[in-house]
Amino acid sequence: MDGKPEMQTEARCWIGAAMRRREDIALTTGRGRFVDDIQPEGCLYLEFFRSPVACGTITELMLDDAREAEGVVAVFGRDDLEICGEAAINRLIEGAPAQIPLSVLAGPRVSHLGQPIAAVVATSRLLARDAAELIQAGIEEEESTADPIPTVRWQQGKAEAILSAAPLRVPARMDHALVAPMALEPRAALAQYDGARLEVFLSTQTPFRARDDIARVLGLDMDRVHVTAPDVGGAFGGKASIYPEDLMVCFAARALSAPVKWSAQRSDEFLAATQGRGAATAAKLALDDEGRMLALTADLEFQTGAWMPYSAYAPPRNAGRMLPGPYLVPDVDIRLSVRPTAQAPVGIYRGAGRPEAVMLMERLADKAARALDLDPLELRRRNLIPASAMPYRTPTGEIYDSGDLAGLLDRLEEVTDYAALRARQAERRAAGEICGLGLALYIEPCGMGWETAKVELCPDGSFRADTGSSAQGQGRETAVAQIVAETLFTTPDRVQVGEGDTDHLPNAIGALASRSTAIGGSAMLLACGKLLVTLRQAAADLAGIELEQVQPGVGGLLLGNRLVDWPRLAADLAQAGRLPAAAEETYTAKGEAWASGAVLAEVAIDPDTGVPTVEGITWVDDAGRIVNPLLVEGQLLGGMAQGLGHALMERVVYDAEGQLLTGSLMDYAVPRASDMPRQIRLEKRSTPSPANEIGAKGVGEAGCIGIPPAVVNAIQDALGPHSGRELHPPLTSERIWRALHSLED
């Protein structure tokens, strides 16, 4: 083997470096490749006739006019489909009620407004839409009779008895509106069938799960289905499961032996995509005279909608198991029920049950502080789980892996000059201003289980890394390249990253539950370690030396004091017939990482209009070991925006007949740039997680978890001298104005 003499020098630390996102060059110059950009020759277009009512029995379905319309190739009703199986539902909760699977096309009953009843395939999108409008259906409307079904109870100690005897009992109730995930790119699906294999392009965050569901429902062997998720313009949990529309596109492509595409309009997303939140939560907290928490009882009721996506049970399970959060509460009694409704399905949405639990606990903490005339920060400090207790087993049986909750509060108090803030608030109030400060402290689970990775030395000496953690805008390609570059002593520009393709790995989970860096990144780290051993052994074999004489060097391998760089090694291995050289890893995390954080929100309210202004957010976050601080900052700010939407404005509304009143962006409010806080301060504290190889914790959902309760607490604090009414999110200007003027909603 030839190699230039070079002594090893210090390698650059890529993990922890603030690298700019390499994905952005293509995306910001119009070179992104989304599902709707893919245009196979002879592509046909599919559109749906959807149920105009919420619940009922189909008595007649008239398809003939649509079949005879210009450009129409086929029209499908439920009877035209051969269903071979059901899409999977993850039964996360033991003893959960009977699962409600999706129907590709409705029949003989419709279960929610907007449910697909028939599908039209035509030579153009507009012709397909025109033909779908010719379909008529007779539907005998019915009342939905679904009742809440108790599913699980977490109980430790004698919470009810302690509550009855406690010196102080504080109640709280928080009802959450349904919200829409609102990804920038609506859902889309494209499929083509060559008689042997079904090629599917989906805007999804779980391509492998989609592959399995498509194969099961269509009755195909799994290796006959290939799913690719190209560029995906956001997901937030709303693209974590297969949908009826996805499956219908696959049915049509197989039946017609032609490419078939469907792309949702925004109205389709409001009508039929999964929604989030929508829980009704209530709790009582018992405290002693010193403000120490003694016991907690809670009743949580979650909706599932008319059918269950894969992770339908994740939000209720998360909310129940997370209580009582960061606080030492020895006795708990938490009751959970799940209620099907005649509405669009409810699934995971950024946070998935975590925001509901934290909001409830943080409202209890603020109300207890007010009742005891204690500062809210002091009450929290008296009840924190100490860092010395980590790992800590909670009353619901969860294990907090690590964290310094007191350190978070201390840092928040320090950087905000909290005492001065309170003094300034008193001055402003004395001058007639309506202003408030709100605190929130949280600890949140960041995913369990396994993920896959593969890394390979390419013939030119670069590396190819495939991750099972798919990307929807998080900067996954950049982060993976950093992990590979540091572990294999190369540079990120020499790492090609692949994701979202079921042909590149045998199996994978995808992107959800804030798990991709912690678990997917750990899988990549271990795969790189395996490959490094393989390459060292190959180099030793070619040089006729022992493995121990070959060590990593900057840009290659050191054979004694001689560096053989990666291109030279790749050429030598190719000549010896030892390429490709690759390693795969299926990594299962040792436990669940728990991220944490503390937030302080500053809010002012216009007394004439009730309009709230978030003047400032200070946020101390602990996401464990950080791979790229720029990516973390982006995730925090994006989650903050969505958290503000939940707290202040977003709400899906149905009328008494089940008709959707918020079916467009004219009626459904989402945060704009002008709604972001005037001042944002982000602070980091890192306690590495022992639950995974990288030491990372989740960060993607934190903004939806910590920001809403801080903002709600700040608004309630501002209203305190004027109104004692408990407001439920979203805290719109109208609701705030009515509370100020003692008017009922």
Image (spheres, rainbow, N blue to C red):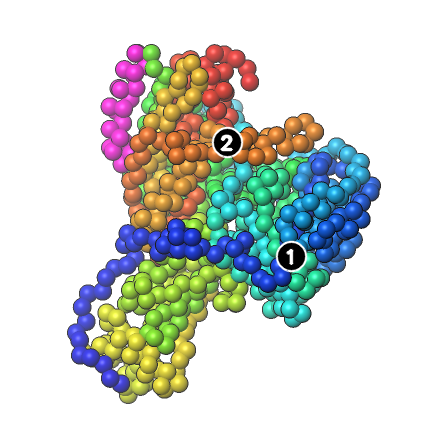
Q: What element carries label 1?
A: strand
In front of the other: 549 or 321: 549
Query: Which of disc 1 and disc 2 is earlier in sequence?
Result: 1
Magenta stretch encompasses residue 421: yes
Asked if residue 494 shows in the view, the reply is yes
How many numbered badges does the structure rendering display?
Answer: 2
Q: What's the residue at 59%, 54% (across, down)?
A: 189
Residue 740 point in image, percent of width and height = 45, 14
- Give the extent of the magenta segment: 409-431
558 falls in the magenta region: no
- Left or right: 68 in relation to 635: right
- Mark 1 = which residue? 44
Q: Where residue 584 sits in the image (x, y, percent)?
A: 44, 69
Give the amino acid at mark 1: Leu
Residue 122's place in the image compared with 612, above or below, is below
**Left or right: residue 46 compared with residue 13:** right
Residue beneath disc 2? 669
**Does residue 369 appear anywhere in the picture?**
no
Name the residue nearer the viewer: 63 or 451: 63
Residue type at mark 2: give it: Ala
Q: Where is residue 412 in the image (x, y as percent from the top left)?
A: 29, 34
Q: Is residue 308 above or below residue 296?
A: below
The vertical placement of 241 against 462, above or below, is above
Viewer-nearest of labels 2 and 1? 1
Q: Is the magenta stretch mostly helix, strand or loop?
A: helix
Circles 2 and 1 in contact, beta carbons < 8 Å: no
Secondary structure of the residue carrying tag 2 is loop
Residue 256 placement: quadrant: bottom right
Residue 536 at what x, y percent from top left? Answer: 31, 77
Please give the name of the residue rendered at 37% of the width and 40% of the height, measured from the top-left corner.
Answer: 637
Whole-number angstrom distance, CA of label 2 to CA of label 1: 34 Å
